[in-house]
Amino acid sequence: MKYYRISFLGECGQHVEEIWSEKQILSNTWYKNWTIMMVEDDKAFMIDNKTAIDDWVVVHWAVEIPKPDWITDENCN
């Protein structure tokens, strides 16, 4: 499984970083909305997990990272 880090400004201007697994990306509501938009744009033939992850990475300016040491099988939802 791959992991991605995103960074953004919080609502009070603080620096926020999040780490997302592929599993989290594909189970997020973003994926459902992305699928709907792909169908509406007549691009249903392009719907697959790899394309979804690639688009998520571009939209969120994500960077692939090695699996963090603190992630175990129990908490990598």
Image (tube, rainbow, N blue to C red):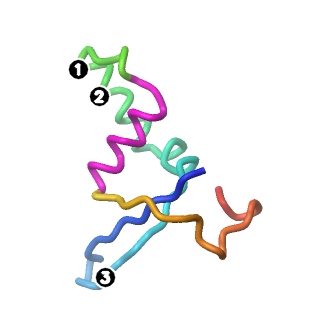
Q: Nearer the viewer, mark 2 or mark 3?
A: 3
Q: Where 71 sits versus 59, above or below?
A: below
The circle on residue 37 is 2
Q: Secondary structure at mark 3?
A: strand
Q: Amino acid at mark 1?
A: Asp
The single residue placed furthest to the front in the displayed view is 66
Q: Secondary structure at mark 2?
A: helix
Q: What is the C-alpha distance between the residues marked 1 and 3?
A: 35 Å
Q: Are marks 1 and 2 in contact (CB under 8 Å)?
A: yes
Query: Could you tell whether 20 is left or right of 17 in the image?
Result: right
Q: Which residue is tagged 3?
A: 15
In percent of width and height, residue 60 lies at: 30, 56
Q: Which residue is tagged 1?
A: 41
In percent of width and height, residue 68 lies at: 59, 71
* Residue depicted at x 31% and y 25%: 38
Chief secondary structure of the magenta span?
A: helix
